[in-house]
Image (cartoon, coloured by chain):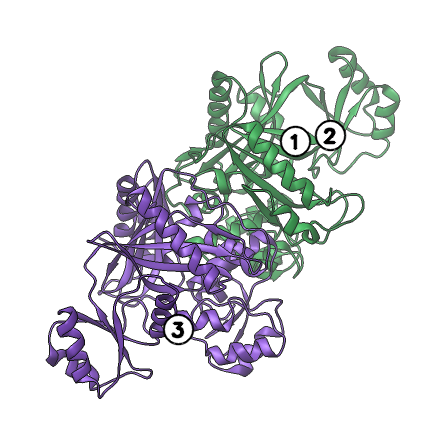
Chain colours: A purple, B green
Amino acid sequence: MVGGGQLARMTHQAAVDLGVALEILAESAIDPAVLAGARHVVGPAGSLDALRSLAERCDVVTLDHELVPAEHLDALQAAGYVVRPGAEALRLAQDKLLARQVLGQAGFAVPPHMPAGGDDLDAVQGFAERWGWPIVVKSRRGGYDGRGVHVVDDLDSVRGLLASTPPGGWVVEVHVPIACELAVLVARRPSGWTAVYPVVETYQHDGMCRELVMPARVPADVADVATRLATSIADGIDATGVLAVELFFTTAGDLVVNELALRPHNSGHATIEAAVTSQFHNHLRGVLDWPLGSTEMVAPAAATVNVVGPLSGDDPARHLAAGLSVPGASVHLYAKHARPGRKLGHVTALGADQAEALDTARAAARLLLGE
Amino acid sequence: MVGGGQLARMTHQAAVDLGVALEILAESAIDPAVLAGARHVVGPAGSLDALRSLAERCDVVTLDHELVPAEHLDALQAAGYVVRPGAEALRLAQDKLLARQVLGQAGFAVPPHMPAGGDDLDAVQGFAERWGWPIVVKSRRGGYDGRGVHVVDDLDSVRGLLASTPPGGWVVEVHVPIACELAVLVARRPSGWTAVYPVVETYQHDGMCRELVMPARVPADVADVATRLATSIADGIDATGVLAVELFFTTAGDLVVNELALRPHNSGHATIEAAVTSQFHNHLRGVLDWPLGSTEMVAPAAATVNVVGPLSGDDPARHLAAGLSVPGASVHLYAKHARPGRKLGHVTALGADQAEALDTARAAARLLLGE
């Protein structure tokens, strides 16, 4: 697995269940997955040499993040290494414009959008006048957890952004009025078998997913459409392992595709406790082309609350005993150095309904933050 | 943790959830917990030096097996290291005669028994004539998974056994006619708080636990008595972490204490999937004196089937994909070298009832054995 963050850490835990040895290409020897005991080589995910040294040790190469040059994955595949998901699929998770184009051409609803570079002020103005302010200006590549995403109300702000255009440029799109955000996780094998988890409802704060409940509190027909949509995308882009499809459920009642991630995803953390098979197990099973596990829930509802480093710099690990005092809360800490705004862990709880589960998870998360 | 077997392996997985670094005193660098990535020193659990080198690296010393000289734990405690469970409690798990004496004196029902050495043929004959054949002749120390336990029908067999008396001698006891075997797992903090799991029903084969269902299919009042009995023992012996109390439910309707284990226990493996908090989490929480987690089940019933190395020497890891094809089965492999009769993994399944869960777990276990 390329990357040694918390997703790799939890994938390692699943690998231990299966007796599979997970090898990591880590950024450093204190990456969360390395501290969890995954075997590793240290090297930059942007280096073909480092990727090759990982691939030589593995049956299958997979990813915990998208910050890998797709052309390097092409090179690994050309050299005969097995890379899942493949480079073509990964490009859609790396490039917001490409994803919008490919999904739009395939008939999936995506927000109206246009690419924009430093010289495109007039074109962006025309776009905003056609669709209305505010508009969303997103970094085409590299943004995540809300970084590189700007909701913009006027032309002066656009001018400011275009003055410092990121590599790859911007994608400008309509600010979709949303009722809620949803995510659908699909596990898929190379042979085409899929297993879909119940639709998740996510709550963002500063662009970072902070809370989620499972299943989403949307009408059954909306959940059905979201599920079929995500499965179609998984098939259409030939995803392997876990694909997370993030969706806007608009105030008009439509489902619009927002982003794709081709790996275990923050929106699926509740599956560890709440589903028969976690997303981490199913990611491994998918990329190893093994039978996928049941995605059924073991409780009526579940919720996950992320534990994000507080502004004080305080470390939630110091408050672990307090967090564990909440009955029914399952605490996960990632062994990361505490920094304000950094995801340091999460809490999941099951419940008779979403509100109950959320109450429990929030109570423990607050205690972990020393509140 | 002293010992690097599968119990330490699964404890490591729980430690990763909590951001706790588990350090292992391992027998070798291919111990299951070492292969799962737990930090370790290699050394014999019988060596005080090795134990001290572990203790120096840890806040608390705990155990994955009983094969540690209790006097060494005394020495560690005397030197100021924190050892949980303590040496006194451990002695009861190491010495079947002492356990019977202490529990019997405290008023708990234990089978009628007597110690026996090489010269005690007449006394054993008298015991058998008083209580009736067959009798059970058990190694006082060191036996587990049925090793050192003999059900004996006649005096010639007794003579044969006494001719090769093990260190510590034998315990001779009544062969209790049992309806079923039960186990109760209690997690306990040094401060005295306990959390008890639903009573488990275990099935032995050649003395090794092969299958278990949770909750046990016994009348509610029997389960209540078993639960109170196990909690009383935990308090009485000042257990910390997980205590497993193995019980005989006799055909006469009585509950008789068979054995104690002061660590996570094979009979609790179903708690990983079936309980809100696994026995491994609660062992850590108990020995670290942190709030214990909920022991409630997340399903009406669960079953675990051990995957024991077949006579052919075949390795279940070779059949993993087949084992994963059973919907609802959670497979655990311990990364141990396959040998006939060795516990190599287990399968847990949830179900609407015990029979359903057992069917699922058995189906996957059979496929893992290549059947």
Residue B276: image quadrant is top left
Q: Looking at the image, do the residues carrying marks 1 and 2 touch, with CB atoms under 8 Å apart?
A: yes
Other-residue count near label 3 (Cα within 10 Å), few / some / many at <14 / 14–19 / ≥20:
many
N-terminal of the pair, mark 1 or mark 2, is: 1
> Local crowd at mark 1 within 10 Å, few (<14), some, or many (≥20)?
many
- Name the spot of residue A17 as percent of width and height, x first: 56, 51
Q: How far is mark 1 from mark 2, CA to CA? A: 8 Å
Residues at circles 2 and 3 in contact by the CB criterion of under 8 Å: no
Q: Amino acid at mark 3?
A: Gln
Chain bearing tag 3 is A
* Residue corresponding to mark 1: B96
Marks 1, 3: nearer the viewer: 3
Which chain does the numbered disc 2 sit on?
B
Residue in view at x 26 percent, y 43 percent: A359
Determine the secondary structure under disc 3: helix
Separation of residues labelled 2 and 3 (CA atoms): 65 Å
Q: Is residue B122 above or below residue B287?
A: above
For mark 3, what is the residue? Answer: A94
Mark drawn on residue B138? 2
Label 1 marks which chain's residue? Answer: B
